[in-house]
Amino acid sequence: MTAALSIRNLRKTYDNKFEALKGISLDVAPGDFFAMLGPNGAGKSTTIGIISSLVRKSSGQVEIFGKDIDADFSAAKKFLGVVPQEFNFSMFEKVEDIVLQQAGYYGLPRSQAKAQTEKYLRQLSLWDKRHTAARMLSGGMKRRLMIARALVHEPKLLILDEPTAGVDIELRRSMWDFLREINAAGTTIILTTHYLEEAESLCRNVAIIDHGTIVQNTSVRNLLQQLNKEIFIFDSRTALEQAPAVKGYQVRLLDEHSFEVEIEKGQSLNQLFEQLTQLGISIISMRNKANRLEELFVSMVSNNKQAGEAKSGA
Amino acid sequence: MELNQQWIAFRTILRKEIKRFTRIWIQTLLPPAITMALYFVIFGKLIGSRIGEMDGFTYIQFVAPGLIMMAVLTNSYSNVVSSFFSAKFQRSVEEILVSPTPNYIILAGYCMGGVARGLAVGVLVTLLSLAFTDLHIHSWTITIAIVILTSMLFSLAGFINAVYANSFDDISIIPTFVLTPLTYLGGVFYSITLLPEFWQGVSQLNPILYMVNAFRYGMLGISDINVGAAFAGLLVCLVILFAAGLHLLRVGKRLRA
């Protein structure tokens, strides 16, 4: 099956000699919901820039649904919709005009462009704002406008660069639902995000990029299986003077009503609860201390940094 | 991209450009109308009556074609330079750069947007001039052809300026320090035959002289230069600037990282 996105040995060195990508290769399957994670400056936006032709690659090959972005740029671009990180529309133009124009740049006939503009502005709750100048929109509305604009030509591959940055929780959840819907309808989605909860909740596969290389490229499930330990925070109904003495578990008191427990891979929560019950401790709630993917991400990026330092030291 | 889709993309850019300059008509259409009306009053009526005839025409009849051409070329240039630079500045140019629209359609679309404003202002100034003098058209073909070609040329020049510009200062340097002096010294207000021989030779290096005189020839049937040479020069310059604009888009000069 032809990959939705195929990247081979992609390199980018900027004019200031900064090597942003050091030969990355990546495949994204059609219909996938794929996360591209990495710290700031890792090379995520450069990769997206090259795919969308806003950044010139130094070498390598990129294909979108089998169409090479150099040899067959017109066909490749028709498959692609991009939602960039920064607002990049004219602040003085009306919402409807911005989306209609984008449809025109893809050669959609006016009647079809109008119908699809209405469809996506309605879906993203912007139809009532269609005659409003873009500068008058709230931050969340501007972000939704960029999504409507990217979707108006109905691309098969949608790339979103930090789509929910600066968006409130309610709106973020509604955007997640919308992205799940269009993914279920067949659109392949790649997103970069700093919210690892977002990647864990939405994506099936993930690539972690750091210092211009891919540190990990696997399914979210496989990645989470690599997690060796998790820390849970427990809230106790009764006040505690010291950390409960639970055999086989590392426990640390946080305050008189909460403590954290480190649970290693293979350890049972049932045993822990049994011991807590024996100690007369009534648990009213529990939660992960940190997002699971976040822990892995931090550990991988940190390992990669240490490896890089060791290599340069040698 | 198929031809009909390219045509849709072209019309989209053109429609956007026309919408832009008509939306801000107080900045784009009104100022040249007021400026040119003042020129007609001062040079045409007040001072012109004392100057007397020039090449067999009243002074206001003589300057009218030059003033119209001056309005056309400065507005064509200003439209593209400000519109494309604003798109670059706000990064909305990325909308079109990520699309499958070919570079020559992008260039042609912006260029024709400049021509649309140049012609809109040209028609406005022509109508204004009718309040001050009778206009005579010697050759409709030459008049229309030269005004469109000149407008295209300055639109392309504005595009190239916008590509290289890094700040709003950069888009006003060329109009202020190059375009305005060349226009004023390009035979708008006088016939170069009035100048000493040396300065006549220097004036002939000014490309705007050819456009103003070819346009004046179309209207009045008089010219200081060879009209055929003016057309030939214009066409050559058009080809060169179009190729330069295409090259800049292809390499992504200051557009792609």
Image: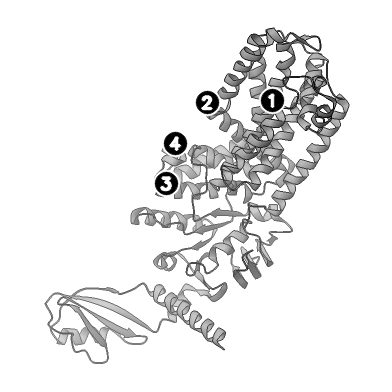
Estimate the x, y position of residue A17 in percent, counting from the top left. 63, 68
Q: CA distance from mark 1 to mark 4?
A: 36 Å
Which residue occupies the foreground of this view, B31 or A220? B31
Q: CA distance from mark 3 to mark 1?
A: 44 Å
Residue B131 visible in image: no
Residue A288 visible in image: yes
Closest to the camera, between mark 1 and mark 2, is 1
Please, what is the three-letter code of the amino acid marked with disc 4? Thr
Q: CA distance from mark 3 to mark 2?
A: 30 Å
Could you tell whether A71 is left or right of A30 in the image? right
Against A229, residue B211 (above or below) is above
For the N terminus of chain A, the quadrant is bottom right
Closest to the camera, between mark 3 and mark 2, is 2
Residue that appears at 74% across and 58% down: A71
Residue that appears at 57% across and 74% down: A213
**Secondary element at image label 4:** loop
The numbered mark at residue B26 is 2
In the picture of the structure, the residue carrying the numbered disc 4 is A132
Estimate the x, y position of residue B59 in percent, counting from the top left. 72, 11
The numbered mark at residue B70 is 1
Q: CA distance from mark 1 to mark 2?
A: 19 Å
Residue that appears at 14% across and 86% down: A279
Q: CA distance from mark 4 to mark 2?
A: 20 Å
In the picture of the structure, the residue carrying the numbered disc 3 is A141
Q: CA distance from mark 3 to mark 4?
A: 11 Å
